[in-house]
Structures are given as structure tokens and as C-alpha cells.
Image: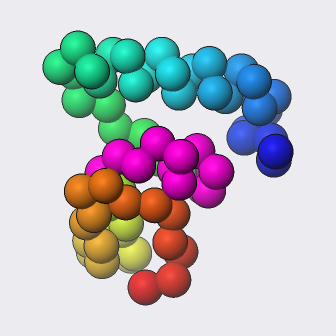
Amino acid sequence: MSQHGNLDPDTAWDIMNLLNDINSRGTTVVMATHAKDIVNSMKKRVIQINKGIIVRDDKKGGYNSEV
């Protein structure tokens, strides 16, 4: 598994699980990442922005850098 920023993969997933728990309790969580494996596994809403314009908004999306 690839590294995410300065976090080892296990720590990255621990943080994602914590954010997912916070989200499941009703709090909106906004996160920016290039971590394809996390985005594809979480299957949460994905909004892709290119030069300040929303180019994709998928309710249960995955990582897709090609639009």
C-alpha cells in the first residue's frame, strides 16, 4: 500500500476510520486527498474540482483523475 503524506498506511486508515465514525454520527467531513486506495475503498461522495470548477460530483464515487 502506498504512503499518504507523512503517515504510514495503518495510521492513515486509523484516521479514515475515525473520520468515518464522526461522519456516521451526523457531522459532515470534507477531505482533500490523492490517495486512490482510500477514496476507492470508502465509496463516499466525491467532488472533483479542476481550476475552481466542479467537473464531477458522484454520490458514491471512486477516484478518477481523468475527466
| Quarter that holds the N terminus | top right
Q: Is residue 33 magenta?
A: no
Q: Is residue 35 magenta?
A: yes
Furthest toward the bottom, the residue is: 67
x and y percentages locating residue 27 in the rendered image: 22, 21
| Quarter that holds the C terminus | bottom left
**Is any atom of residue 52 visible in this view?**
no
The mark tally for this picture is 0
Whether residue 4 is situated above or below residue 51 in the rendered picture: above
Residue at 51% in and 21% down: 17
x and y percentages locating residue 6 in the rendered image: 78, 32
Question: With 34 as the anchor, is 22 left or right in this view?
Answer: left
Question: With 18 as the anchor, is 24 left or right in this view?
Answer: left
Of residues 27 and 54, the one nearer the viewer is: 27
Name the colouring of the figure. Answer: rainbow
Q: To which quarter of the image does residue 9 belong? A: top right
Residue at 39% in and 76% down: 51
Question: With 50 as the anchor, is 10 left or right in this view?
Answer: right
